[in-house]
Image: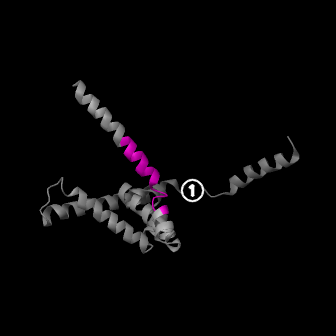
Amino acid sequence: MSKEKMNETNFEKMSKTYQPKPPYFMNCVKAFIVGGLICTLGELLSEMYVHWFNFSDEEAGNPTVATLILLSSLATGFGVYDKLGQFAGAGSAVPVTGFANSVTSSALEYKSEGYVLGVATNLFKLAGSVIVFGVVAAYVLGIIRYVWSLII
């Protein structure tokens, strides 16, 4: 082993002993609380649509999701969701609000390049893979369900 390589390895080992340990437990607690609060907001919105607007439980799902997307996009636009994400980590990545945040962030980041070449081409840069895998998974599961219904 060369002297340079040995020094690099020793340096890495020595530097790791001085690095602070991440607060894993507190990160989990913050993610749990914030994610739970986002989900609680979703439940409150759903109940609001059921009781105030006479939706059925099944019908209340779509406006609830749309409202969560709107609120998340607005929070992203005003810079609130970024601060929430820094505090809560994975807790802010609840599927619907995290997805809306990623789409809105991309749109805001590239708006200076124009609506077509900036926003439109980069809108789904972060969320595109989620859409692709979601559509493919839905297609595969749909075929499995169809075949299963033919068998039974």
Among the 4 quarters of the image, the one containing residue 22:
bottom right
Residue ID for mark 1: 22
| Colouring used for the render | one colour
- Residue at horizontal 18%, vertical 52%? 58
Residue 143 versus residue 57 in the image, above or below: above
Mark 1: few/some/many CA within 10 Å (<14, 14-19, 20+): few
Q: Label 1: state its secondary structure.
A: loop
Quarter of the image that includes the N terminus: top right
- Residue at horizontal 42%, vertical 48%? 132
Among the 4 quarters of the image, the one containing residue 77:
bottom left
Bounds of the magenta segment: 121-137
* Residue 96 in picture, x, y percent from top left: 36, 57
Foreground residue, 82 or 146? 146
Asked whether residue 67 is in view, the answer is yes
Asked whether residue 26 is in view, the answer is no
* Residue 59 in picture, x, y percent from top left: 18, 56
Q: Amino acid at mark 1?
A: Pro
- Residue at horizontal 45%, vertical 64%? 120
Q: Is residue 15 left or right of residue 51?
A: right
Q: Is residue 122 left or right of residue 9?
A: left
Foreground residue, 4 or 121? 121
- Residue at horizontal 46%, vertical 62%? 123
* Residue 107 in picture, x, y percent from top left: 46, 67
Among the 4 quarters of the image, the one containing residue 90:
bottom left
Q: Is residue 105 left or right of residue 36?
A: right
Quarter of the image that includes the C terminus: top left
Foreground residue, 53 or 138? 138
Predominant SS of the magenta segment: helix
Number of on-image labels: 1
130 drawn magenta? yes
Foreground residue, 147 or 32? 147
